[in-house]
Amino acid sequence: MNAKDINQSYDLLMLAQGDTNLKAAGHYFIGACPFCGGTDRFNLTQKADGWRWLCRNCTDTKYKSPIDYVMRRDGLNFKQALEILGGIYSTPAPAPHAKFPKPEAPSIVLPDSTWQAQHWHEVTQACEALTTNKSARAYLELRSLNPSTWNMYLLGFVMVFDPKTQIKRAAISIPWYDSDETITAIKYRFIDDLAKDKSYRYTMAKGSKQILFGMHITSGNEMLILTEGEFNAASITQITAHESLNIDAFSFGSETATHADILRTVANDYQRVIVWADNPDHANAIRLSLNRSADALCSPEIDGVKYDANTLLQKGYLARFLQETIKGSGSPIK
Ligand SMILES: [Zn+2]
């Protein structure tokens, strides 16, 4: 995808909701600016060519693109932001190990204790609702995730308000937490008919901060796999527990820009790191952002279908695939 495609299709609403509280007002979403604060100066709207934003205080009056947003938020240049969002930079690439500029100091403030208490309460209720909701259980079973994995990740069932469609919809709730006490985000994966359309699959709890998914399950293994998508990380964890493989798996989310500085810090605790994404350029961009030796792995393609970790799990191939990856260097792209 080129920059135009990314700016057209990228779900900036979902990303920005993690950075600030936005209220729907007609065709706009209004809230505090994630960069300069205030209460209602940030403005997000969906135009014919995708999501656009501006701030009445810290930008000029022209609407900005999703790439502009990620450049500013994560202190990236245009090329880095484009690649992090899954795009391909089309002029000749610079030296492969070009040093990234020093990022701005991490500006992540965790949700406050009131937010956390409220959302723990919600997670507890959602877990309970999952025990009796047939369609939610069927959805997770179809994805070959076991009840023990649901429990480990505290997956639940909720009817949640979707700001995009302005209705309440059935969803699997996927909490992100750093430790048993600190919950940083809740992502919702809708499971109704509307979710057949890719752009109506996810939303997040207001005030969520996506840091890294699955960090509470670290076993201090030698090898780390960083993947797209929460269910991919859960699939790897499920298999590694079963097969006694020494792998920790975290997810940097899906279609969501990553805090490169945090990935870098976490990756440094491991002897071997693999970045796994569907798109080889995306995997490679994240690999380079780690500033250390790491392999990039893209999902194998069989008969035109991309096999991510969860698809491999469903087909019964994931254990073998991981064993091969540990033995060799998988199918790294350099
Ligand atoms: Zn601002």
Image (tube, helix red, strand yellow):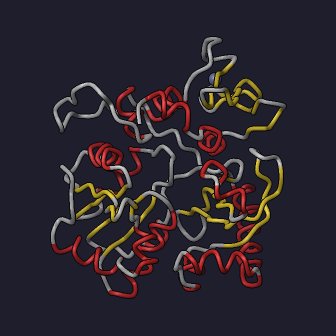
- Coordinates of residue 245 in the picture (x, y in percent): 30, 81
Q: Disc count in the image?
A: 0
| Quadrant of the snapshot with the N terminus | top left
Provide residue 23's location: percent of width, then percent of height: 79, 38
| 75 horizontally vs 180: left or right | left
- In this orientation, which residue lies closer to the viewer: 113 or 96? 96
Q: Which of 262/329 is in front?
A: 329
Most foreground residue, 266 or 76: 76
Q: Using the image, determine if residue 267 lies above or below residue 1.
A: below
Point out the residue furthest to the front here: 303
Please indicate whether residue 139 sits to the left or right of residue 240 in the image. Answer: right
Q: Quadrant of ligand 1?
A: top right
Which one is nearer the viewer's eye here, 331 or 258? 331
Q: Residue at x 74, y 38 (%)?
A: 22
Query: Residue, x 21% and y 57% (percent of image)?
Result: 332
Q: Quadrant of residue 195?
A: bottom right
- Image spot of residue 185 (x, y percent): 62, 56
Name which quarter of the figure residue 98 lies in. Answer: top left
Residue 311, placed above or below residue 94: below
Residue at image location 64% in from the left, 22% down from the top:
54
Q: Is residue 185 above or below residue 109?
A: below
Compared to residue 13, the image places residue 158 above or below, namely below
Q: Residue at x 64, y 53 (%)?
A: 197
The location of residue 184, given as percent across then percent down, is 60, 56
121 on left or right of 319 = right
